[in-house]
Amino acid sequence: MNEIQSNISNQEPLIGFPDWGESKNWFFKDLKVHFRVTGDESNTPIVLVHGFGASSDHWRCNAEIFASQGYRVYGIDLIGFGRSEQNLQGKIKYLDNKIWAKQLASFLDEIVDVKRNGKVILIGNSLGALTAITTLSERPELIKAIIAAPLPEPIFVNPIRNLFPSCMYKVKSLLIKVFFNLFPLKPLVNLISKTKLITLALQSAYFRSILNDNFLKRIVTTPARRPNASKALRSMCIGMSSRENAAKGPSIVQKIKSLQNRPPILLIWGKQDKLIPVFLAKKLVKLHPWLKLKVIDDAGHCLHDELPTVFNQIVLKWLKNLNTSN
């Protein structure tokens, strides 16, 4: 049975202070990357990868729990997010999941030190999950298992076909660049981050009310108010909108399917996810039965933060079974 519905009580408040573990910096392509770490150095490494607009702070209710259960836990801020560099300084032209996957792979090589400490478990929320599977498709030797909670881009569940000549894609790419370079992103980011619009935007990712969760609002608004936030967002908009089909979720899943020693992948979905409805997850698993799916009631897109007790128990139980079967 690929789909398992959680029967754990979902009655828990939205709590948790964003600061956890030890805060550190590292450099990728001469750009500063912020990350957090907690847990014993000798334990199996877990790397937490946040979603769009978030940061390592968003794992406020998960990281220390995993560490207490015998894991060395890292949380990385992807380039453009959190406390990581937002001014690309010409080092990187545009941001997309391929770039973030290279950043993550370098982090696994240099900081987590997979060769010494063993393969890593990646846990990603949305964009972080896409980054995790992209990393797996490029560097499978680094990864022991992936938990995608949830996985974005399953809308075109089947691999995307090239329907237009290459010259048309070049025109599309040019138009995307012109549009986002002309679009007034800076005033828009300021408007959203400094008004009640941020609450409306965040609420779309949660099933429960986040009206009084000031810590959550701080997690998202603080990076958005940094001087180069709009520059980073423009780079992401262009990069993610003009990617080749091979860099998109369905094609990456298809590539992973053909890996010789494919690590296990667990999808965790909120039943009330308004951004990526759960029926798409079920369709994805039907097409790829080697993916496992667990659905959590009364949870939206950020289920790891909305129902952390439920989420943490599912993750720890699955990892325990994984270790037992190995």
Image (tube, helix red, strand yellow):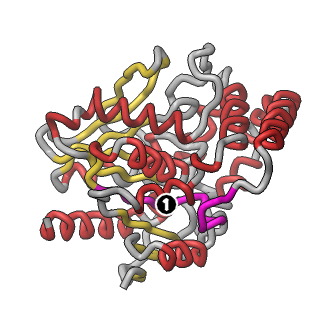
**Where's residue 6, x and y in %?**
39, 80
Q: Secondary structure at mark 1?
A: helix
Residue 225 seen anywhere in this rendered image of the structure: no
> Is residue 32 shown left or right of residue 158?
left
**Where's residue 274, x and y in %?**
66, 68
> Is residue 71 shown left or right of residue 240?
left
Is 20 rendered above or below residue 148? above
In magenta stretch: residue 265: no
Is 214 rendered above or below residue 253? above
Q: Main secondary structure of the magenta part?
A: loop
* Residue type, mark 1 in image: Gln
The span shown in magenta is 145-161
Closer to us: 102 or 61: 102
Closer to us: 91 or 219: 91
Q: Residue at x 43, y 67 (%)?
A: 267
Q: Residue at x 41, y 42 (%)?
A: 138
Q: Which residue is mark 1?
A: 254
How many numbered circles are shown? 1
**Where's residue 281, x and y in %?**
54, 72
Q: Residues within 10 Å of mark 1 (few under 14, many from 20)?
A: some
> Is residue 187 shown left or right of residue 311?
right
Q: Quadrant of the C terminus?
A: bottom left
Q: Residue at x 65, y 65 (%)?
A: 156
Q: Residue at x 27, y 68 (%)?
A: 318
Q: Quadrant of the N terminus?
A: bottom left
In magenta stretch: residue 160: yes
Q: Quadrant of residue 183?
A: top right
Q: Quadrant of residue 290?
A: bottom left
